[in-house]
Amino acid sequence: MSSKSPAILWFRQDLRIIDNPALSAAVASGRPIVPIYILDEETPDIRAHGGASRWWLHQSLESLRADLRAKGLTLVLRKGSARHVIADVVSQSGAHAVYWNRCYEPGAVARDTAIKDALKVDGLDVGSFNGSLLMEPWQIETGQGGPYKVFTPFWRRLRELYDLPDVAELPESLTPGPALDSDALADWTLCPTAPDWAGGLRETWNVGETAARERLHAFLDGPVADYPEDRDRPDRAGTSCLSPHLHWGEIGPDQVWRAASLLLDEGGARAKGAESLLRELAWRDFNHHLLFHFPEIATRNWKPVFDGFPWHDNPEGLAAWQRGQTGFPIVDAGMRELWHTGFMHNRVRMIVGSFLIKDLLVDWREGESWFWDTLVDADLANNAGNWQWVAGSGADASPFFRIFNPMSQGEKFDPEGKYVRRWVPELAEMPGKFLHRPWEAAGEVLASAGVSLGETYPEPLVDHAVARTRALEAYKEIKSS
């Protein structure tokens, strides 16, 4: 046992031990380590986890606890205001240092700043680090010295500045601090029980640091070669599905970059796929860059002109969209995939977002809220940023008048209908010609496929052509006001 006083290692969205800068700092300090995770549902402006995120967190904490135990450490779990919990643990452990990796959400920034200031006043050594982004939001500036608002120049600048850090090696065993009382993870009731709706999540995901690394290497060993095309094909297993692992910090973006960059020198398809993956990592950084510099984008339109948009109060349409009962097969497939797996293919996220906002004229914040509750990768910066991108109200956004046609999108990106047939099984026997527009099929075609519109599968909520015209008129109204 070290004669030094302990260091508290505060885990947050960095639930891993490899390539964890805060853990490396704690080890380098030579102090015994007290690892802690705090379920903070009390600090103002800290958004509570959605249901799917709570399920993932439970599994990830179990995995982290086992990984730490293998290194000789015991993870302490506490629930409450992080400021009060940290103060209590400092007092109980006699710690003289606290280390953590930074979060960039507005509420977390304010909370962490206050905690750091208070600890420093008390004479503690406090270190915070970058464990979740390629580059921190203040490290990339335009030529005028301000934040970027457009992705492509941000990406070019990140490529110029990014310097892949070395990985600190961890010793086989770590020195534990004093034993402290811990909450029982089960007492946090993060997993649903009445009813238990998480069967699809359990079926879909392996959670934790080892699973994250395995998923990365499986992707780079195969699907990456076809990623530039397959990233738009929900009917193929062509994406990395790393987003929840990245959000929870079970793997860091530096680790992904390090592994993917090895393919760049190969040339050919795998190099192109790796470059596309790195660009997606940068898009993730870009959304955090925007949220840090413009925190209001989490809840308010980036473009103020959208404050006057004539959104419709449409609870029936919203509920049908949430349930995957809109009558548009590609939309319904996406919403059902989301409910079952806690995930949705990115192309389909854009399609269902466009449908809610532009076909139904429902405020993008309603969609963002539903995704927050149902996505295992729900992330404030990415969720709000991407919803505003679809709405046309965000930074570097798709223009509002880009309105996805759900029929042609389905026909283009799910041409054989594999995705729709999987998630909308009541249409499984429909001929491909009508699968993405079943209302155009003759009665005998529907009957032979076992489909009765309005009974076994809903009639379309709207006429897309009419809804498109309505949306464009609404946009013209705010543009001219």
Image (cartoon, rainbow, N blue to C red):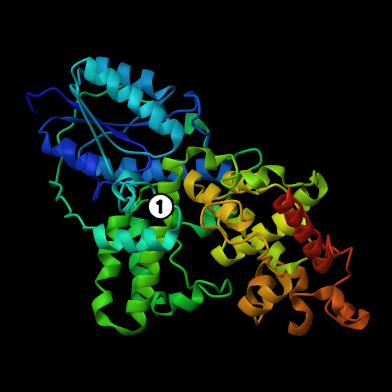
The x and y percentages for residue 399 are 61, 61
Residue 289 or residue 226, whichever sits in front = 289
Residue 372 sits in quarter: top right
Mark 1 = which residue? 148
Q: Amino acid at mark 1?
A: Tyr
**Vertical comparison of 95 with 278: above or below:** above
In-image side of 120 versus 4 (left or right): right
Q: Quadrant of the N terminus?
A: top left
Q: At 32% from the left edge and 16% from the top edge, which residue is drawn?
A: 88
**Vertical comparison of 23 with 477: above or below:** above
The x and y percentages for residue 474 are 77, 54
The x and y percentages for residue 216 are 35, 64
In-image side of 375 versus 255 (left or right): right
**Vertical comparison of 422 with 98: above or below:** below
Label 1: how many residues lie within 10 Å, few (<14), some (14-19) or many (20+)? many
In-image side of 293 versus 10 (left or right): right
Q: At 44% from the left edge and 56% from the top edge, which residue is drawn?
A: 243
The x and y percentages for residue 98 are 23, 28
Residue 448 sits in quarter: bottom right
Can residue 297 be seen here? The reply is yes
> How many dots with numbers?
1
Residue 203 or residue 252, whichever sits in front = 252
In-image side of 372 versus 150 (left or right): right
Q: At 65% from the left edge and 64% from the top edge, which residue is drawn?
A: 351
